[in-house]
């Protein structure tokens, strides 16, 4: 077996992990979740969720990956706890499962870049979304997106993922700042900011029972936890990195991009008088194009801003997708000594096939998404936190301290993981399972209604 690859620079690892974390969730969920649940008041809760729950869990994945030096499934044997491989397998399965529909959405986004350029996406947004989001064209766009993802992963850690994300992540931030600056010039922008961030502790308190678990769930999802992705990325690290410092950088940057996306999306919608709605695909693929079409300049300005906006979303989706594929590729490469490029191609073919139902009908996409986000993700995070907190124990502390500038925090971290994080994740899992299996309207235990 050849020597295992590593990141060439520390910043390369940090950018790759930010690229994984920054994705569709930052653009189509976070801004709308914030505005609907008390603005800046929600932001405080979310920051708490990120720093007290998300960050310790992220560090748990980093500790496992760097110490084991192998994929998220092989890691547990490498750490001398082979029976726990199921935890990693659940995560990698979830990553693979998620990629199948994430890349369908990536395909839509690519079509929206093109549709902005030609103007068709802005001329009749609802009709365009209908044409793009389901059926054979969506299958084709899905194939293209998978192909690009495979191409980057096939090139390896240094020449593929690190190189790509080193370009992509700074581009996302720079372009979003540009878009936010442009949005600030629009009349009505200030109402958008007010809608986004005006603190409303009353709304937050009144809905705390649902808002708090949602905030915690979003923090875990947004940091790409549970899917073995952060374990895999950390497995390519050397011993001289400070995991806590890198983890904090990633968590802060990811939140920053979410806020930045809100500073683009909400002023844009408000300036054009388009209802902000609840976020999700309707917001990004229908409301935004509607707002873009209403910009002055006879449509040309809207098309240019559209290309940039959907370009950003495309890059964000792609830099997440490559991490999802890498989790599975790393497993086969590490454990079976397979060649990286053909492995990436083979897995890409399976991901493509698995995503075909989601590309043909959005009801399938919702079903795949529901299983991934409400079932696989929290269960995987719960089992990983249990493993690191209660099984790995002293080894976890030692790994946390290695290269760390804040070694003294190691015991505090482990105790937070064992208690607060574990408790919160148990509650999130319990609520999700309740929704999933006991609530007919939200249950995913049945095939989606339109397909029955
Ligand atoms: N964090 C991504 C987003 O906000 C979505 C995501 C969840 C993800 N888990 C992941 C991306 C694992 C890559 C890997 O859109």
Image (cartoon, rainbow, N blue to C red):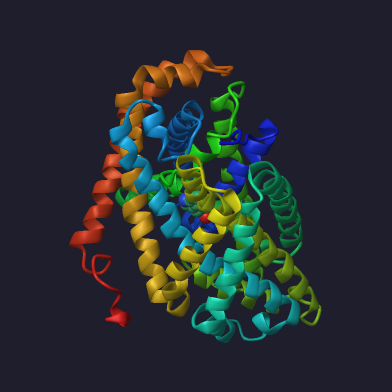
**In which image quadrant can residue 191 be found?**
bottom right
Question: Vertically, is 59 above or below 259?
Answer: above
Which quadrant of the rendered structure holds the C terminus? Answer: bottom left
Q: Quadrant of residue 185?
A: bottom right
Q: Is residue 199 visible?
A: no
Say which quadrant the N terminus sits in. top right
Q: Position of residue 167 (x, y in %)?
A: 74, 49
> Which corner quadrant of the image does residue 27 belong to?
bottom right
- Relative depth, front residue between 393 and 223: 393
| Residue nearer the viewer, 107 or 44 | 107
Which residue is at a point 45% across and 36% down the rendered structure image?
48
**424 to the left or right of 286:** left
From the top left corner, tell me how far across and down residue 172 is, in percent: 69, 53
Q: Is residue 309 left or right of residue 277?
A: right
Left or right of 334 on screen, residue 447: left
Q: Is residue 287 above or below residue 172?
A: below
In the rendered view, tell whether residue 239 sits above or below residue 73.
above
- State whether residue 426 appears in this view: yes
């Amino acid at each position: 077996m050849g020597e295992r690859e590593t990141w060439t620079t520390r910043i390369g690892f940090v950018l790759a992990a930010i690229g994984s974390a920054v994705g569709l969730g930052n653009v189509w969920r976070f801004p709308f979740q914030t505005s609907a649940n008390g603005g800046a008041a929600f932001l405080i809760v979310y920051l708490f969720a990120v720093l007290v729950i998300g960050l310790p869990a992220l560090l748990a994945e980093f500790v496992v990956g760097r110490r084991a030096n192998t994929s998220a499934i092989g890691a547990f044997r490498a750490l001398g706890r082979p029976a726990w491989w199921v935890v990693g397998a659940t995560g990698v399965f979830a990553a693979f499962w998620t990629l199948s529909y994430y890349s369908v959405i990536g395909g839509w986004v690519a079509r929206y870049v093109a549709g902005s350029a030609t103007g068709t996406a802005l001329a009749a947004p609802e009709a365009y979304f209908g044409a793009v989001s389901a059926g054979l064209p969506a299958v084709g766009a899905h194939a293209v997106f998978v192909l690009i993802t495979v191409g980057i992963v096939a090139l390896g850690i240094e020449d593929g993922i690190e190189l790509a994300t080193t370009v992509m992540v700074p581009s996302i931030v720079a372009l979003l700042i540009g878009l936010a600056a442009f949005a600030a010039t629009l009349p009505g922008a200030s109402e958008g900011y007010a809608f986004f961030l005006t603190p409303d502790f009353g709304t937050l308190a009144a809905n705390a029972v649902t808002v708090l678990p949602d905030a915690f769930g979003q923090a875990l999802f947004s940091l790409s936890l549970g899917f073995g992705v952060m374990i895999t990325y950390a497995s390519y690290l050397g011993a001289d990195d400070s995991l806590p410092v890198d983890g904090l950088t990633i968590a802060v940057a990811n939140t920053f991009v979410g806020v930045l996306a809100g500073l683009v999306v909400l002023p844009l919608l408000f300036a054009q008088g388009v209802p902000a709605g609840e976020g999700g695909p309707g917001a990004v693929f229908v409301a935004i194009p509607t707002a873009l079409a209403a910009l002055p300049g006879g449509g040309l300005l809207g098309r240019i801003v559209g290309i940039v906006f959907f370009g950003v979303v495309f890059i964000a989706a792609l830099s997440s997708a490559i991490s999802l594929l890498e989790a599975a590729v790393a497993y086969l490469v590490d454990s079976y000594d397979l060649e990286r490029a053909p492995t990436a191609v083979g897995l890409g073919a399976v991901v493509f096939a698995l995503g075909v139902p989601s590309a043909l009908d959005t009801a399938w996409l919702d079903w795949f998404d529901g299983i991934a986000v409400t079932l696989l993700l929290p269960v995987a995070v719960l089992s990983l936190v249990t493993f690191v907190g209660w099984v790995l124990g002293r080894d976890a502390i030692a790994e946390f301290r290695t290269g760390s500038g804040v070694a003294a925090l190691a015991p505090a971290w482990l105790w937070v993981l064992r208690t607060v994080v574990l408790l919160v994740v148990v509650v999130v899992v319990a609520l999700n399972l309740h929704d999933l299996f006991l609530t007919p309207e939200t249950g995913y235990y049945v095939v989606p209604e339109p397909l029955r």
